Image (spheres, rainbow, N blue to C red):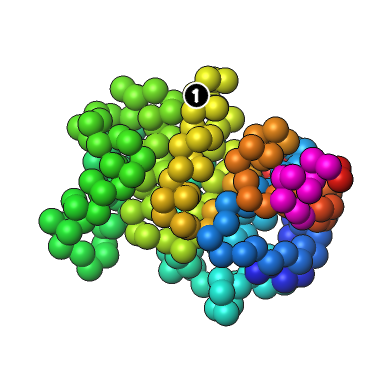
Amino acid sequence: KLENLTKIFTDKRGNETLAVDALNVVIPPGQLVSLLGPSGCGKSTTLYMIAGLLRPSDGKIYFGDNDVTRVSPDKRGIGLVFQNYALYPHMTVRQNILFPLENMNIQREEALKLALEMAELVGISDQLDKKPAELSGGQQQRVAIARALVKKPDVLLLDEPLSNLDARLRLQMREEIKRIQRETGITTIFVTHDQEEAMSISDLMIVLDFGKEQQMDSPQQIYYNP
Ligand code: ADP
Ligand code: ADP
């Protein structure tokens, strides 16, 4: 639940940009929700505040009944996937997926089991010894999703995860993200500027414009009442 969530950026000269303007949204658990709107409307800023990577200027963020507004990113129970995957290039696929488990109190064997489980979930378990550069864009995105899910977070955040893929892979990965979300039942927020993509992938769409919520409805409702 986002309550009056607001972000104002202030530059060195003191000029202010109201990036997110008092957003009030309740996202039902277990749904795949897209955050849709044109470039600059505040999608990434909203996502990064939910992730804990940007501090809100005002307002609150709740996961269930927990106010997580001041909780650090690693303790929030989120998995984050960036537009450019942000994999560690010098590490293998296995090491990339294992990375979030390091410094946690988990036995090596248990960690490897979890990593393999995630690799199987996203369909990458035959590529574990490769480096990211040896993989296609779609495969790299699968690894990024496995890495985001390995700590079994409550919320999966995807920032334009398909925009660097070619048209064919984009359609294929759309279906894969839907399948992974259905299989895990994880509450998922999917940022995109592509209306058709949002329509096809989500249970619920939040349409943003100038940092404000314009509409929040199912794709069917939005299609018939744009
Ligand atoms: P979107 O993800 O929808 O493209 P953003 O959330 O990236 O939009 O940006 C929303 C607005 O906030 C834009 O006007 C953008 O220029 C501004 N903005 C985003 N990040 C910063 C920042 N770090 N400093 C200053 N302004 C920013
Ligand atoms: P995209 O629209 O592709 O999502 P963004 O607009 O979100 O890209 O910008 C990517 C990065 O640049 C983000 O970290 C964002 O905070 C930062 N950023 C965006 N606009 C500005 C700005 N006007 N000043 C400083 N940083 C910005």
- x then y, percent, for residue 70: 57, 73
Image: 154 above or below 85:
below
Q: Amino acid at mark 1?
A: Leu
Local packing at callout 1 (Cα closer than 10 Å; few below 14, some 14-19, many 20+) is some
| Residue that extends furthest to the left in the rendered view of this protein | 109
**Nearer-the-camera pick, 61 or 125:** 125
Give the quarter of the image for residue 143: top left
**Nearer-the-camera pick, 25 or 59:** 25
Would residue 84 be visible to someone looking at this image? Answer: no
Q: Residue at x 58, y 43 (%)?
A: 159
Query: What's the magenta bit mostly, secondary-structure-wise?
Result: helix
Query: Which quadrant of the figure contains the C terminus?
Result: top right
Is 156 left, or right, of 96 in this rendering? right
**Nearer-the-camera pick, 73 or 27:** 27
- x then y, percent, for residue 53: 55, 58
Query: Which quadrant of the figure contains the N terminus?
Result: bottom right
Would residue 2 be visible to someone looking at this image? Answer: yes
Image: 135 above or below 107:
above
In the image, is residue 48 part of the stretch drawn in magenta? no
Residue range highlighted in magenta: 216-224
Q: Which residue is mark 1?
A: 169
